[in-house]
Amino acid sequence: MRRNKPGTHHVDVYPLIWKDFTDNGYVTLFGEDLPEISLFSLRFNGFDKVPVDHYMRPFWLAVQKSTIRKRSGKYCIGAKAKHLYTLDYVKEFFEKYQRVPKFAFGFHTQLSHAVTYPVQHIGKIIVRHRVSTTNPTTAIVRITFICTALMNTTIRDTTSATVTVVLIINIIIIIIIIISIIIIIMTNTI
């Protein structure tokens, strides 16, 4: 699985959560904003096949090569902030599939990866892009993680940063367990 190691494979072989959703009739989405440091491609071999129904990686790879991106500011594509593309994509995904069960997993690495972007601003952006539904039987659960550990600075070498990473990993594991329980409950009630 590790990039550039002999005998490794793609991450498709692992039991990623969206596979359970797909198996239960959900339409799925996965998006992240920085393909060069993406969760499954930075240190791993990435996916061999498209992992979900709606996948943002091809969009972001094309954006990186585009002339408009090269002429834009670091956090924009043209006049639009980069993170708004993912937020709009997720919102449109939920609007398009009003009557279909759906699962979306996306994150914005750039907003907090290498700069101290104020967390209160990120929260305001997320709230402005909340997803709603007209279907009374639809439940929307939105979980937002914001990493403020600044892993590209000297802070990375401190005990505080190490503890932060361990806490983040534990929180992610707890969230995955909670989501798995939700899937089991929802599958048994459909």
Image (tube, grey):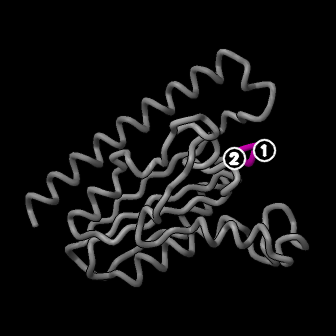
Amino acid at the residue labelled 2: Ser
| Frontmost residue, 108 versus 141 | 108
- Identify residue for label 2: 112
Q: Position of residue 79 (x, y in %)?
A: 81, 78
Q: Residue at x 21, y 46 (%)?
A: 181
Percent position (x, y) of residue 128?
56, 69
Q: Secondary structure at mark 1?
A: loop
Q: Amino acid at mark 1?
A: Val
The residue that appears at 52% across and 46% down in the rendered structure is 145
Verify CB contact (< 8 Å) between mark 1 and mark 2.
yes
In this picture, residue 55 sits left or right of residue 114: left
Name the image quarter holding residue 115: top right
Instruction: State the residue position of label 1.
Output: 115
Any magenta on residue 161? no
Q: Depth check: 14 or 142 in front? A: 14
In front of the other: 37 or 106: 37
In magenta stretch: residue 113: yes
